[in-house]
Amino acid sequence: MARVIIAGCGYVGCALAERLIARGHEVWGIRRTIAQLPGGIRGIAADLAQPLRPDALPAAPEYLVFTAGASGHTESAYRQAYIGGLRNLLDAVDRSRLKRVLFTSSTAVYAQDDGEWVDEDSPTAPVQFAGRIMLESESLVAACGIPSVALRLGGIYGPGRTRLIDSVREGTARIDEDAPRYLNLNHRDDCAGALEHLMFLDGPQPLYLGSDPNPEDRAVILRWIADRLGVPHPPGDPAAMSRGGNKRCSSRRLVESGYTFQWPSFREGYGNLIGTSP
């Protein structure tokens, strides 16, 4: 039985915690308010933006997972969460038995914008603050003195996060028909599954891309959702561009390490969500 701390135990962190608890592991979850944590998670009410008391954390954890998110899409919020919060956690945690630190990063570190494929070895030269701060955070984790793994995630969706479906159903979605705009998606279950896989993997690489293996043009996805819902296709609008560049992220390294995606493309993931929605 492993002792695991999940810092920022929210959408992905709770899904990971539930998987680990089901397998008999002991899990602590850090978040500002713990009343809504699922059963079995040992809650630690703390603000990662503030220095943490070492005695507030469990002794001798074996794995530390940082899945915290920023409180807003501003540079100060990102820096507070991903630099300040990460440093506060690393300063406070008991390292006596710590085997591995896992960090959820972002595909925002890539600036590629011509639909090309990128992987863990592709250049990272982000022009936006989010990507720059995530790269800084990755470096902070890599230099912490404990073996670490960063998992770069794309757009996370799943139960309760159905923005694309809702926009098509409500008639607010728009499509850029001039050129493909690729989306790199991550179902919540695969975010959690990949983290669990990398937590216990023998000799992991320090960096993995975690997007599902089948990035697709946003217009194709929206039209497919419309067909499944039985509603008209979204109209064209040249201004309807997705945020975050235009690249295709390869998860080959993750798959070759032995991970099997539960939801390998938007068709399986969104199909399930549409089929189970009221």
Image (tube, helix red, strand yellow):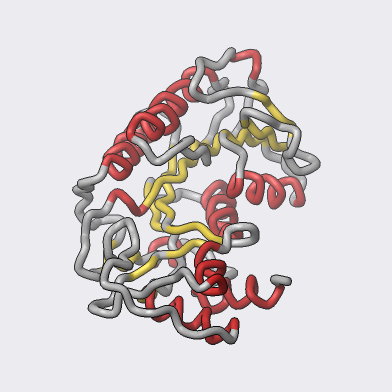
The vertical placement of 103 against 169, above or below, is above
Q: Residue at x 49, y 61 (%)?
A: 186
Rendered-image quadrant of the N terminus: top right
- 160 or 59, which is in the foreground? 160
The vertical placement of 198 against 46, above or below, is below
Q: Residue at x 67, y 25 (%)?
A: 45
Q: Residue at x 43, y 50 (%)?
A: 151
- 270 or 107, which is in the foreground? 270
Quadrant for residue 223, please give it. Answer: bottom left
Rendered-image quadrant of the C terminus: bottom right
Q: Position of residue 143 (x, y in %)?
A: 34, 30
Left or right of 274 in this view: 234: left
Left or right of 17 in this view: 24: right
- 12 or 194, which is in the foreground? 12
Quadrant for residue 210, please give it. Answer: bottom left
* Badge count: 0
The vertical placement of 73 against 112, above or below, is above
The vertical placement of 166 against 178, above or below, is above
Q: Position of residue 19 (x, y in %)?
A: 69, 52
Q: Position of residue 40 (x, y in %)?
A: 79, 40
Q: Residue at x 64, y 36 (%)?
A: 4
Q: Position of residue 117 (x, y in %)?
A: 27, 68
